[in-house]
Amino acid sequence: MSKRKSNESTLKEAIDRLLKAYRLEDKMTELTIIERWEQIMGKPIALRTEEVYIQNKTLFVRLNSSVMRSELQNAKAKIIELINKDSGKEVINDVHLL
């Protein structure tokens, strides 16, 4: 087994440095949130979701159910908490339901 030299790094470390250098960390985190929407919010909400996108730390969610939209309107703080907890940092600070 060979030892890693001090100037060598793992692939993950190299990718993380690359994302940071090109200021793409936040965009990558946003894409991960969108990809994990069903796991974060659950299948019933995901089935009624038509579109999810993030702009300027605001999550926009288009739903096809007015009842679900009304229910989620009352749970905006919980949605923000779930998403930020899942991503490990503050990515979202507001939610708009469309």
Image: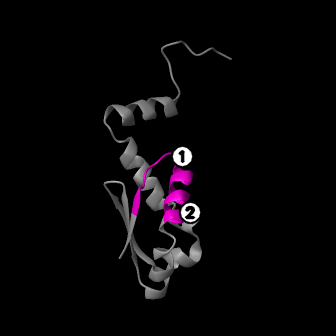
**Position above or below: 66 against 41:** below
- Of residue 33 and residue 77, the one placed in the foreground of this image is 77
Residue 39 placement: quadrant:
bottom right
Q: Look at the image and say whether residue 50 sits in the magenta stretch.
A: no
Task: Mark 1: give few (<14), some (14-19) or many (20+) Cα within 10 Å.
Answer: few
Q: Secondary structure at mark 1?
A: loop
**Which residue range is magenta in the image?**
77-94
| Residue at the disc numbered 1 | 88
| Residue at the disc numbered 2 | 40
Q: Residue furthest right?
A: 1
Classify residue 42 as left or right of residue 76: right
**Percent x, y of residue 65:** 45, 86
| Mark closer to the chain start, 1 or 2 | 2
Q: Main secondary structure of the magenta part?
A: helix
Residue under the image location 35 percent in, 42 percent down: 24
**Percent x, y of residue 54:** 35, 59
**Percent x, y of residue 79:** 51, 64
